[in-house]
Image (cartoon, rainbow, N blue to C red):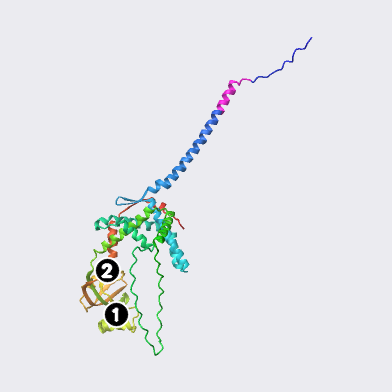
Amino acid sequence: MSKSPTTRNVQLPKEPTRRQLSRAEREARQSRIVMLAVGGVVAVLALVLAFGWLRENVLLQNEPVANVNGEMILTRTFQNRVRLARAQLIQQRDRALALGDQDTAAQYQQQLDDTQGLGAQVLQELVDEVLLKQGAAEFNVSVTPDEVQAFIEEDLNYFRNPPTPEPTRTPRPTPTVTEPITQTPTPTITPFPTATPVTAEGFQQLYQEQLSYLASLGFTEAEFRQIIETRLLGEKVRSAIATTVPTITEQVQFRYIRIDAADVQTMTEAINRDGFEAVYQSILSGTFPITTVQASETFDWVPKDAISQTSEFGPVLAEELFSAAISQTTFIGVNQAGTASYVVQLTGKEVRPLSSSFLQDAQRKAQEAWLEQRRSPTFYLNWQDRVPNTPR
């Protein structure tokens, strides 16, 4: 009788129970929730970083820091100009250090360290540039692209039309000296070397180097040329303002004795007794017993404004001085600080052209007054947070 084959017991996989299915589904769902949450956090972080970059490099750069009669000064413009100012200060500091001038270098470094002060200075310059540009129509002035190009070329020492050289002077013959010279020789000043003009090719190379350097500070070539145009336009407007200043006005010459408040009575008695001239000459020679008094003379012709705007004389004394008669000796009163009085002898009074120094000063004050009347920009309070501190 044959044996029957052995029967193997095969264990079939059990069907998951309903409880097991429910638990697996719950775990899968929880895993998906965790993954979605992690993905959401990553997405939010990416959005935050992207928005931060977008705000810092695009949105904030186009936000205004000042409004000048409707014309906005953008953050990008402001920051680039501060970087340019810092780069120029660094160059000046390093040049002073190379020359061993530690004090001057320290002054430049102090300006670099005062980030807010430098930012305020640059912002005021930008405001004034906008005001001058807006005033160009008032004075009918403009700047052409050719003028901008000519300025850039000459600034880099390239001259398309070289200036005519001055004629060479024949030196005078040296006189023969029979006796030794005992006079102390006057020290001579060594002139700065004259920059060598460059060729057209040399100019192009220098210009590209300049553009590359400006690009490192955030400037495009168009922005660089715009800066040049604005500054040239501002110079023309300033020149036009200067032409409004009268060149001829009443002026005086005078001699005076300055007396400290404590010595007024004593000096009055001395002048009444000995006369102005005697006391004046005694003070000049150093023989007058009161050493605190001062005697001086104005050799130049002086306009009223120049006297009234001094911290010592002031408008009241200027008015009294211009009301005095020539050769009249008079007390013109106490100075603005109340520390001294003046005895004045008027030696000349006439209407005449202003000297170059007084005319330039009057023109500068007229330009400043023109700007001051128009300086009413709206500053945005957050500009202080946008002042860059680079380059260092």
Instruction: Provide the secondary structure element on which disc 2 rests.
Output: helix
Q: Quadrant of the N terminus?
A: top right
In which image quadrant can residue 247 be found?
bottom left
Instruction: Provide the secondary structure element on which disc 1 rests.
Output: helix
> Which of the labelled discs sits on residue 267, or is there none?
1
Point out residue 316 in the picture as x, y percentages from the top left corner. Answer: 25, 69
Alpha-carbon distance for marks 2 and 1? 36 Å
Sooner in the amino-acid sequence: mark 2 or mark 1: 1
Instruction: Report the amino acid beneath label 1.
Output: Met
Judged left or right of residue 88, residue 68 is left
Mark 1 is surrounded, within 10 Å at the Cα level, by few (under 14), some (14 to 19) or many (20 or more) other residues, namely some
Residue shown at 43%/44% (left/top)? 54
Q: Is residue 281 in view? A: yes
The reply to whether the magenta stretch includes residue 20 is yes
The magenta stretch spans which residues? 14-27
In the figure, 130 relative to 18: above or below? below
Taking depth in this image into account, of 142 and 17 the one nearest to the observer is: 142
In which image quadrant can residue 165 be found?
bottom left
In the figure, 203 relative to 54: above or below? below
Residue shown at 26%/83% (left/top)? 277
Residue shown at 46%/64% (left/top)? 94
Judged left or right of residue 266, residue 37 is right
In the figure, 158 relative to 278: above or below? above
The reply to whether the magenta stretch includes residue 226 is no
Q: Which residue is mark 2?
A: 359
In which image quadrant can residue 112 be found?
bottom left
Instruction: Report the amino acid beneath label 2.
Output: Leu
